């Protein structure tokens, strides 16, 4: 670990590592033991769906929280990841036997409705699960690389970058809806059945997918933690707080920004692919502006500087959404609006900020001699920097 | 509501005789059942017998779900369906419920969001174990919930006119599929207006595209010509370029399947461009009384709409229905095609459960074919083996007050044909 070069006291260093690891262990215990024991398969599957958004929120913590790059288009990458997986599953569900009532058997049903006579060339490789899995991560990362290259090399940042990402989200939605013969249009790619012959619609499959999803999420949190603690992570914070100084120190700022943007895109895409597997379809309604902004809200509610906070924020917002809409079908949107306003007005640093402000000091006091509650870049950092790119 | 009760003679009028005899026997018993005190029927039909698959049925109640968007962009369209379904359920409960059991409604909000529809459908079927669900509006929401209904074996009554190309054991389609709605209207406009050329315009998604595909085949089959075909994204509001094309090509008929808010812009811009719908024939398959509220009667008066139901239909069923609807939901409310189709759902389900003497989904699915509802506001409907409805198609002419004058209706019921040969 590059930590050794830090001038902080060793005791504090170990204390902080323990804090992060303990937090992750606690989350892991919650996701892997408590929730599966406490919830029936229907609710557990819903939690699994929420957790796929947590991948996006994790990416945003790095991209927005650490590096100060606010992207309002993370739905693009979530969507592309989900579509890559959905294309593979759809091809498997469209075997010639299963689709023999179509005028052209063997192609997905929506292509048949749109008078396509053969599978388009870019669908062909998605017969292979290996290709599809690689594409889930590679296609969004590549797109993020191109967008990042075009933006950051020209020093486009801050609110302009946010608006451009939003425009990309709108463009992609229109493209998907408009090319319905190739993409399934506004209906999306629906009725996905099996993964290599394994029926993903059964309760057992849902349980297995939930655990795979939870394990992947924990893995991604560890990966993010590693990135944040590396020298790279600290450069990201530095360029958020004083970009010019970093540039004058000889770093190519754009490269770091491109990296973190691609990284966040890849994380979102993993979430998208898991979403498709657990929910059983993918549609342009996850790609557009509204879902992209919702994903930023999950991150904001949890605390944009905190990896664990983002996960809890995602769970909390989605859980509230489901519960409120079940209990008050006509009023729940108002309740959600009130919740968001409340978050911004009362605790702008999100759940993690609340934890850091009220709970963490009480936990720390008994531990001998560590009175300083000063924050660094750990999993529960409280301080919003004075100047962020979004300002 | 006595006239809504099943008229046994009419009901069996068109059925082959062995089935007819069985039905007559069953139906003859029904009035007697109606006379029994409440609870007696439940004893006559014990819960164990009518519910072998652990649905939410007790000795006195049965739970059903309503799954529409009450929030989001689709709420304005779906609210009418919710109201109609609740009205039907209230009327059925007033008559003593279904198989002696009062209907309890669990309403869920799909929030104009397809995955939410899927989530709520799963909740209704898995957690609440409802005996039937009345819901969905857009094709996308139906496509999202369909695998859920098939997996958990639920029953969905879907009210919207739609593109066809679908048939499921677990869905009853109470709206028209595309060929039912389109072909008769095209034939009428050809005969009445001598139309030779058509300009097709629609919103860009599966329903308008499929509808126009069917329309184009039918038009070309009869030696007529399509002079233009254009699609616009949902929510699009700039129609000036296509209106210019319409002016250049001078089609005999503009054939429109623009949906939602885009309609307002489209008809206002047509009027502003000087196209008088009293002189230029326009036929729409997407504007009901509900859409007219937004468009404004003065902007669309003179246009023809082709569907199966108009609020102004003159028949005793419809007069009762309109009066009951306004009494329950306010005198200002209007009733469009889909709202009426929503009203059919609970009634068809009730009739089917009484024929099957069971709430079991498999028995309901099997008993659905041949179910007839003589109390339908649109007149009389019958469920086809393919789970769509036999229904008449009508052409209405838009008036400035937001209603339609019915100018044509087919003589016979039109057979639903979701997979039309020669039109794909």
Image (cartoon, coloured by chain):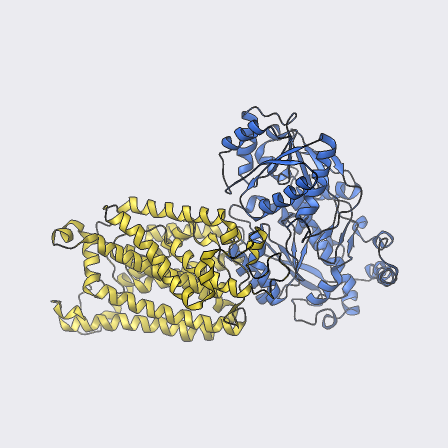
Chain colours: A yellow, B blue
Q: Nearer the viewer, residue A121 or A240?
A: A121
Tell how many labels.
0
Is any part of residue A303 visible from this angle? no
Q: Quadrant of residue A224?
A: bottom left
For image coordinates 31% across by 63% down, the residue present is A307
Q: Is residue B209 above or below residue A21?
A: above
For image coordinates 69% across by 44% down, the residue present is B181
Question: In the image, B98: left or right of A307?
Answer: right
Question: In the image, B227: left or right of A308?
Answer: right
Q: Nearer the viewer, residue B39 or B130?
A: B130
Q: Nearer the viewer, residue B207 or B68?
A: B207
Q: Residue A21 in the image: x percent, y percent?
A: 28, 72
Q: Nearer the viewer, residue B99 or A85?
A: A85
Q: Residue B277 in the image: x percent, y percent?
A: 63, 27
Is any part of residue A320 visible from this angle? yes
Q: Quadrant of residue A9?
A: bottom left
Q: Is residue A246 above or below residue B150?
A: above
Q: In the orientation shown, which residue stands out farthest toward the top?
A: B274
Question: In the image, B369: left or right of B280?
Answer: right
Q: Is residue A208 above or below residue A344?
A: below
Q: Residue B383 in the image: x percent, y percent?
A: 75, 55
Question: In the image, B267: left or right of A358?
Answer: right
Q: Quadrant of residue B267?
A: top right
Quadrant (top left, top right, bottom left, bottom right) of the N terminus of chain A: bottom left
Q: Is residue A62 above or below residue A25?
A: above
Q: Residue B236 in the image: x percent, y percent?
A: 49, 39
């Amino acid at each position: 670990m590059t930590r050794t070069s830090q001038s902080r006291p060793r005791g504090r260093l170990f204390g902080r590592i323990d804090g992060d690891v303990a937090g992750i262990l606690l989350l892991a215990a919650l996701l892997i033991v408590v929730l599966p024991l406490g919830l029936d398969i229907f609710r557990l599957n819903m939690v699994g769906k929420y957790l796929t958004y947590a991948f996006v929120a994790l990416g945003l913590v790095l991209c927005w929280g650490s590096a100060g790059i606010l992207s309002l288009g993370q739905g693009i990458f979530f969507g592309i990841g989900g579509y890559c997986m959905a294309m593979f599953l759809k091809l498997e569900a469209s075997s010639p036997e299963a689709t023999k009532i179509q005028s052209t058997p063997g192609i997905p049903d929506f292509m048949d409705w749109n008078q396509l006579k053969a599978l388009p060339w870019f669908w062909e490789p998605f017969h292979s699960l290996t290709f599809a899995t690689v594409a889930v991560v590679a296609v969004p990362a590549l797109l993020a690389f191109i967008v990042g290259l075009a933006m950051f090399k020209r020093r486009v940042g801050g609110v302009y970058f946010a608006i451009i990402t939003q425009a990309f989200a709108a463009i992609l939605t229109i493209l998907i809806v408009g090319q319905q013969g190739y993409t399934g249009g506004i209906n999306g790619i629906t009725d996905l059945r099996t993964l290599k012959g394994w029926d993903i619609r059964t309760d057992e499959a849902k349980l297995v997918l939930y655990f795979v999803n939870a394990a992947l999420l924990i893995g991604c949190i560890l990966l993010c933690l590693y990135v944040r603690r590396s020298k790279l992570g600290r450069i990201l914070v530095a360029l958020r707080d004083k970009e010019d100084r970093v540039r004058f120190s000889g770093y190519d700022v754009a490269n770091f920004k491109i990296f973190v943007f691609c990284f966040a895109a890849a994380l979102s895409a993993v979430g998208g692919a898991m979403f498709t597997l657990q929910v059983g379809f993918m549609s342009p309604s996850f790609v557009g502006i509204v879902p992209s902004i919702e994903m930023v809200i999950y991150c904001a509610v949890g605390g944009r500087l905190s990896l664990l906070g983002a996960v809890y924020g995602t769970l909390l917002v989605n859980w509230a959404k489901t519960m409120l809409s079940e209990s008050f079908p006509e009023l729940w949107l108002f309740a959600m609006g009130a919740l968001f306003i409340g978050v911004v007005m009362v605790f702008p640093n999100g759940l993690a900020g609340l934890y850091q402000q009220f709970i963490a000091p009480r936990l720390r006091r008994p531990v001998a001699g560590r009175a300083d509650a000063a924050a660094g870049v750990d999993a529960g950092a409280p301080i919003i920097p004075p100047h962020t790119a979004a300002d | 509501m006595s006239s809504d009760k099943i008229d046994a003679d009419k009901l069996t009028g068109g059925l082959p005789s062995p089935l007819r005899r069985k039905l007559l026997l069953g139906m003859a018993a029904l009035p007697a059942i109606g006379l029994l005190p409440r609870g007696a029927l439940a004893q006559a039909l014990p819960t164990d017998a009518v519910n072998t698959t652990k649905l939410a049925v007790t000795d006195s109640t049965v739970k059903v779900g309503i799954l529409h968007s009450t929030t989001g962009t689709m709420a304005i369209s779906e609210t009418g369906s919710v109201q109609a379904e609740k009205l039907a359920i209230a009327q059925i409960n007033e008559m003593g419920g279904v198989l002696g059991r009062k209907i309890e409604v669990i309403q869920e909000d799909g929030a104009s969001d397809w995955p939410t529809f899927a989530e709520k459908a799963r909740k209704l079927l898995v957690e609440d174990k409802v005996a039937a669900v009345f819901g969905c509006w857009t094709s996308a929401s139906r496509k999202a919930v369909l695998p859920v209904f098939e997996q958990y074996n639920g029953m969905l009554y879907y009210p919207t006119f739609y593109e066809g190309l679908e048939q499921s054991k677990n869905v009853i389609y109470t709206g028209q599929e595309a060929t039912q709605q389109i072909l008769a209207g095209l034939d009428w406009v050809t005969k009445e207006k001598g139309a030779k050329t058509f300009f097709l315009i629609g919103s860009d998604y599966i329903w308008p595209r499929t509808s126009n595909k069917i329309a184009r085949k039918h038009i070309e089959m009869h030696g007529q010509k399509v002079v233009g075909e254009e699609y616009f994204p949902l929510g699009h509001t700039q129609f000036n370029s296509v209106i210019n094309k319409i002016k250049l090509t001078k089609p005999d008929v503009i054939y429109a399947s623009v949906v939602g808010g885009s309609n307002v812009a489209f008809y206002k811009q047509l009027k502003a461009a000087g196209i008088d719908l009293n002189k230029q024939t326009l036929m729409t398959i997407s504007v009901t009384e509900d859409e007219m509220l937004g468009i404004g009667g003065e902007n669309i008066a003179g246009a023809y709409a082709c569907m199966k139901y108009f609020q102004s239909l003159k028949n005793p069923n419809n007069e009762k229905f309109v009066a009951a609807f306004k009494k329950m939901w306010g005198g200002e409310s209007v009733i469009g095609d889909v709202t009426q189709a929503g009203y059919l759902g609970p009634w068809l389900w009730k009739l089917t459960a009484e024929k099957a003497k069971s709430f079991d989904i498999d028995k309901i699915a099997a008993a659905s074919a041949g179910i007839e509802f003589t109390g339908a506001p649109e007149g009389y409907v019958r469920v086809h083996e393919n789970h769509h409805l036999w229904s008449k198609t009508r052409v209405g002419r838009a008036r400035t007050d937001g209603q339609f004058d019915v100018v044509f209706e087919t003589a016979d019921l039109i057979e639903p044909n979701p997979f039309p040969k020669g039109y794909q």
